[in-house]
Image (cartoon, rainbow, N blue to C red):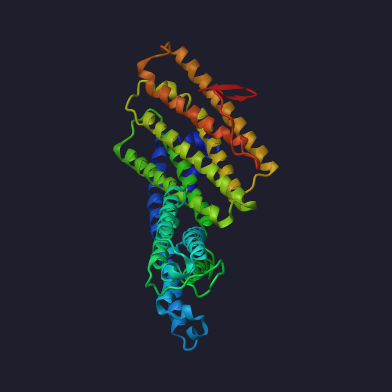
């Protein structure tokens, strides 16, 4: 168990949660979180070094295999004549380098884009050589028309540039399209292509496509062996870290709202925490996209990806809300200390339920499923959260009235802003009650309804 998880666990119980609102306990939490932050940074650096080293070793092994196979006596002679060209064999390494990456999803995506781009050029070459077999060098026989070749080139280039395809696929399509058409329109070209709708395995276009298939397949293979490295696993680990970070920051920010002005050191620590989480959230979106290429959203893989994406959206929203809470909590105004001190136990309870809901969401994402028991438990958590927020809102309103404070008192702007964002946090977490296997979207409402009332925001 990490140190930050221990700090979060201190807030898991009601009594411990209330104690966390004590200034001394708050300082202890910040110190623990600070040490844990340094510890996690060290682990992250080591993990990054390990992953980069592993990627380099896999890539080196694959390139060595390609070069070694090309130098084995008699092996290249067993290949079809067109594939005995050392330059064409070297293209296998070229395709491998352009496709290989740290995860299976990354390699599969790159492989598909490279193959699709090359295939566009090969198909165009096949069509043109079926219409004018041999191209310009056999113009006297096939009735070759240069104008038609130029029109074909212009139209295909326009379509490749216009259509919504990836830049990688577009790059290879244009590259090979230009190369194949230059051979086709050159009367002195020695390149051979398929003719009359027959596929020539030794043809220039087909041979480049085969080499592309071999190189990209090799790249995917070396992300799977000796063990698979998946974007799914990376997303799972990143979500755990982000969830822990959001829970810790939420606990620290709310615990710091006790009437004691935050020091510059505390603000700096919190700012580093927000920056680290924001960077992680920015990185994880790309990995979520790569997860699609590892399962194509089929079966359990699809459920896991959609759950992970929904949880990331929730974490991103909570990060913004907790940042807003921090802006209110760092205020130096202390005129309403007595008013807010009486609300601290209820605020602690609210944070407890929020952290528990995040833990439950994390558990559902981890197993990639939402069973009836998990769904019912989530609904109960949300009901408790909303009831606590309702009581907190009522208590805050009553305390203001008892103190004879004006509803628009300028001295309570920070407190009002703090309460507003607690309500926004409640509303964001309450939407998880709609998470089921069939939908992850909760209808927007103007308030959070429960059997005990409605929290208006």
Is 72 or 280 nearer to us in this picture? 72
Between 313 and 222, the one lying in front of the other is: 222
Give 312 or 377, whichever is nearer the viewer.
Answer: 312
Q: Is residue 450 above or below residue 110?
A: above
Measured as percent of width and height from the top left, residue 431 is found at: 57, 33
Residue 1 seen in the figure: no
Q: Residue furthest right?
A: 372
Residue 451 vs 86, above or below: the answer is above
User: Image quadrant of residue 64?
Assistant: bottom left
Against 13, is 392 above or below?
Answer: above
Q: Nearer the viewer, residue 122 or 277?
A: 122
Residue 148, quarter of the rendered image: bottom left
Residue shown at the point (47%, 36%) measured from the top left = 317
The spot of residue 368 in percent (x, y) is: 61, 49
Report x, y in % for residue 442.
59, 33
Q: Quadrant of residue 249?
A: top left
Residue 296 in the image: x percent, y percent? 58, 53
User: Looking at the image, how many numbered discs can be counted on the residues?
Assistant: 0
Q: Name the residue at 59% across, 43% down.
A: 360
**Residue 18 in sight here:** yes
Q: Residue 374, relative to residue 70: is it above or below?
A: above
Q: Residue furthest left?
A: 264
Task: Identify which residue is drawn at 38% across, 30% down.
Answer: 329
């Amino acid at each position: 168990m990490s140190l930050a998880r221990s700090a979060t666990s201190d807030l898991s119980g009601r009594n411990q949660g209330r104690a966390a609102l004590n200034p001394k306990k708050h300082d202890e939490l910040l110190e623990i979180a600070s040490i844990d932050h340094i510890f996690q940074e060290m682990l992250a650096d080591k993990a990054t070094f390990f992953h980069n080293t592993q990627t380099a070793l896999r890539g080196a092994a694959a390139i060595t295999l390609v070069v070694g196979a090309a130098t084995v006596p008699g092996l290249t002679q067993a290949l079809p004549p067109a594939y005995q060209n050392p330059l064409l064999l070297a293209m296998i390494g070229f395709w491998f380098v352009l496709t290989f990456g740290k995860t299976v999803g990354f390699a599969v995506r790159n492989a598909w884009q490279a193959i699709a781009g090359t295939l566009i050029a090969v198909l165009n070459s096949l069509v043109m050589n079926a219409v004018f077999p041999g191209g310009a060098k056999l113009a006297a026989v096939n009735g070759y028309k240069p104008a038609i070749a130029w029109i074909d080139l212009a139209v295909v280039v326009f379509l490749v540039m216009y259509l919504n395809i990836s830049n990688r696929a577009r790059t290879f399509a244009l590259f090979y399209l230009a190369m194949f058409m230059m051979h086709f329109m050159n009367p002195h070209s020695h390149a051979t292509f398929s003719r009359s709708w027959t596929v020539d395995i030794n043809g220039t276009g087909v041979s480049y496509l085969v080499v592309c298939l071999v190189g990209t397949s090799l790249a995917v293979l070396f992300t799977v062996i000796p063990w698979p490295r998946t974007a799914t696993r990376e997303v799972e680990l990143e979500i755990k870290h982000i969830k822990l970070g959001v829970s810790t920051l939420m606990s620290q920010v709310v615990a710091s709202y006790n009437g004691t002005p935050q020091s510059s050191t505390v603000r700096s620590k919190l700012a580093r925490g927000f920056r680290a989480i924001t960077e992680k959230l920015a990185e994880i979106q790309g990995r979520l996209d790569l997860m699609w290429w590892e399962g194509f959203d089929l079966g359990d893989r699809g459920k896991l990806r959609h759950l992970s994406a929904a949880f990331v959206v929730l974490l991103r929203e909570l990060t913004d809300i907790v940042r807003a809470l921090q802006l209110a909590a760092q205020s130096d105004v202390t005129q309403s200390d007595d008013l807010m001190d009486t609300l601290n136990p209820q605020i602690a309870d609210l944070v407890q339920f929020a952290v528990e809901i995040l833990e439950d969401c994390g558990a559902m994402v981890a197993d990639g499923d939402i069973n009836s028991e998990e769904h019912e438990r989530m609904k109960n958590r949300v009901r408790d959260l909303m009831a606590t927020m309702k009581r907190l809102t009522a208590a805050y309103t009553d305390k203001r009235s008892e103190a004879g404070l004006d509803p628009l008192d300028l001295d309570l702007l920070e407190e009002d802003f703090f309460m507003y964002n607690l309500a926004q946090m409640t509303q964001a977490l309450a939407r998880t009650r709609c998470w089921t296997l069939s939908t992850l979207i909760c209808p927007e409402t103007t308030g959070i309804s429960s059997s005990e009332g409605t929290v208006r925001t």
